[in-house]
Structure formats: structure tokens, C-alpha cells
Image (cartoon, rainbow, N blue to C red):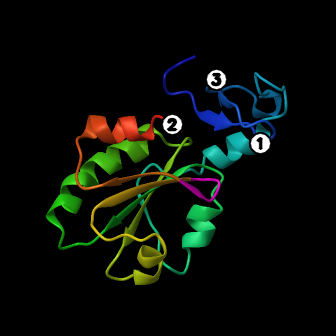
């Protein structure tokens, strides 16, 4: 399979599967449990390849109830380290499209969610899967360190 093959999570067992580009989607099956991947492949084709903006109003829907793991960047426009991390997150959103969603939450405009997650310093990156916080990173880190941070889910 080519490196550009989409990777989709089986809706039954959760196994990550590469789906050969151009394959008849009706025939795509999980390599572990053999369940149909048709719906998962279709959902993957609409996965964002750039960071998405989330707010207090849609955080639950777009992050907590996401079928994919979500890396949330708690940031503010005036924050220099936040601006340093932004291009790294854009690259990761593209690299892990279909396996991870990168979301950005402006803490100045969305204080409720920032407070709920006890964000005291920015940038804060929080990795959320199935509605649960898996890990947290505070401060601007190197691209390699951020990618290592994601290794538990991608």
C-alpha cells in the first residue's frame, strides 16, 4: 500500500486499518475482526487536514464526542509560544488526517472550557480520546517532542 493510504479505525473493534487507495469501499474490511469499514472510510474522507477552531458552545460535540482522538491546543493570539507551536500543529493535522483531529481553543474567548480543563498556562496541549484526557503538555515544545506526545494514539 502507498504511504498515502487512508488509515481508518474499525467501528467494531477499534483496530487501525490502512485502506488501499482506489479500492472498492464496499469491500473494505477490518484486518482484525473482518467488519465492514465502509462507514469509517467515508467518515475519514471528511476528516480535517488542518486545525479546527472549537468553542465553549461546540467543544462537547466536536471534541468529547469525536470518533477520533483530538489534540486540543489551548492558546491565545497574544501568546508568543502559542504562535511558535501553531505551524507544528498545522503539519501534524495534515500528517495524521483521518487518525487525529487537531483543535484550537482560544482561551480568551472560551474561558468556560479552559476553566473546566484547569488550563493555567498557555500553550497547553491536551490529548483527548473517547471523551477522556489521556495526556497534557504545557509550554512550547519541539516538533519531535509533540509527535512523541501523540504516539499513544497515532
- Tell whether 134 sits left or right of 14: left
Foreground label between 3 and 2: 2
Element type at mark 1: loop
Element type at mark 3: loop
Residue named by callout 3: 20
Q: Residue at x 63, y 69 (%)?
A: 61
Q: Residues within 10 Å of mark 1 (few under 14, many from 20)?
A: some
- Tell whether 81 sits left or right of 98: left
Which image quarter holds the N terminus?
top right
Q: Residue at x 69, y 40 (%)?
A: 41
Quote the CA–CA distance across marks 3 and 1. 18 Å
Residue named by callout 2: 152
Quote the CA–CA distance across marks 2 and 1. 19 Å
Q: Residues within 10 Å of mark 2 (few under 14, many from 20)?
A: few
3 to 127, vertically: above or below: above
13 to 82, vertically: above or below: above
Q: Residues within 10 Å of mark 3 (few under 14, many from 20)?
A: some
Q: Which residues are magenta?
A: 129-133
Q: Which mark is residue 11?
A: 1
Amino acid at each position: 500500500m502507498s504511504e498515502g493510504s487512508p488509515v481508518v479505525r474499525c467501528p467494531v473493534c477499534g483496530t487501525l486499518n490502512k485502506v488501499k487507495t482506489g479500492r472498492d469501499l464496499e469491500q473494505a474490511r477490518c484486518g482484525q475482526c473482518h467488519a465492514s469499514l465502509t462507514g469509517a472510510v467515508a467518515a475519514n474522507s471528511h476528516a480535517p487536514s488542518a486545525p479546527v477552531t472549537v468553542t465553549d458552545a461546540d467543544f462537547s460535540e466536536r471534541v468529547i464526542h469525536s470518533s477520533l482522538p483530538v489534540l486540543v491546543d489551548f492558546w491565545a493570539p497574544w501568546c508568543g509560544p502559542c504562535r511558535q507551536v501553531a505551524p507544528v500543529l498545522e503539519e501534524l493535522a495534515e500528517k495524521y488526517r483521518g487518525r487525529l483531529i487537531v483543535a484550537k481553543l482560544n482561551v480568551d474567548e472560551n474561558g468556560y472550557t479552559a476553566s473546566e480543563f484547569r488550563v493555567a498556562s498557555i500553550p497547553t496541549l491536551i490529548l483527548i480520546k473517547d471523551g477522556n484526557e489521556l495526556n497534557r503538555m504545557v509550554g512550547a515544545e519541539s516538533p519531535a517532542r509533540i509527535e512523541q506526545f501523540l504516539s499513544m494514539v497515532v
